[in-house]
Amino acid sequence: MDELKLPVILMLLRLDGRIEKVRFKITGGLP
């Protein structure tokens, strides 16, 4: 279970990071 969860969690974190970067660009850094 844990061995399968780790890659999935990492993928989700990477996606979240990308989304946050896109949001930052779109909003111009506004909260």
Image: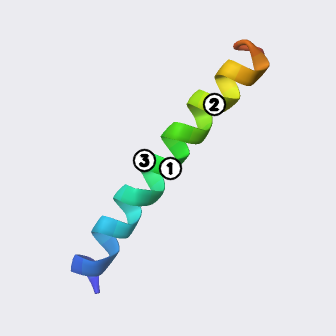
Circle 1 sits on which residue? 15
Identify the residue at image location x=28%, y=79%: 4
Tag 1: amino acid: Leu
Identify the residue at image location x=66%, y=22%: 24
Q: Answer yes or no: do the residues labelled 3 and 2 have beta carbons within 8 Å?
A: no
Circle 2 sits on which residue? 22
> What label sits on residue 14 in the rendered view?
3
Which quadrant of the figure has residue 27? top right
Secondary structure under the numbered disc 1 in the rendered image: helix
* N-terminal label among 3 and 2: 3
Is residue 25 rendered to the left or right of residue 5?
right
Question: Which quadrant, please, contains the N terminus?
Answer: bottom left
Q: Answer yes or no: do the residues labelled 2 and 1 have beta carbons within 8 Å?
A: no
Q: Answer yes or no: do the residues labelled 3 and 1 have beta carbons within 8 Å?
A: yes
Q: How would you rate the neighbour count of disc 2 (Cα within 10 Å): few for under 14, some for 14-19, many for 20 or more?
A: few
Q: Where is residue 11 in the image (x, y as percent from the top left)?
A: 40, 58
Secondary structure under the numbered disc 2 in the rendered image: helix
Which quadrant of the figure has residue 19? top right
Q: Does residue 5 lie above or below 10 as drawn?
A: below
Q: Position of residue 23 (x, y in %)?
A: 69, 30
Residue at the outermost bottom position: 1
Secondary structure under the numbered disc 3 in the rendered image: helix
Identify the residue at image location x=52%, y=39%: 18
Tag 2: amino acid: Val
Tag 3: amino acid: Arg
Identify the residue at image location x=39%, y=63%: 9
Q: How far apart are marks 3 and 1 (CA)?
A: 4 Å
- Total label count? 3
Q: How far apart are marks 3 and 2 (CA)?
A: 12 Å
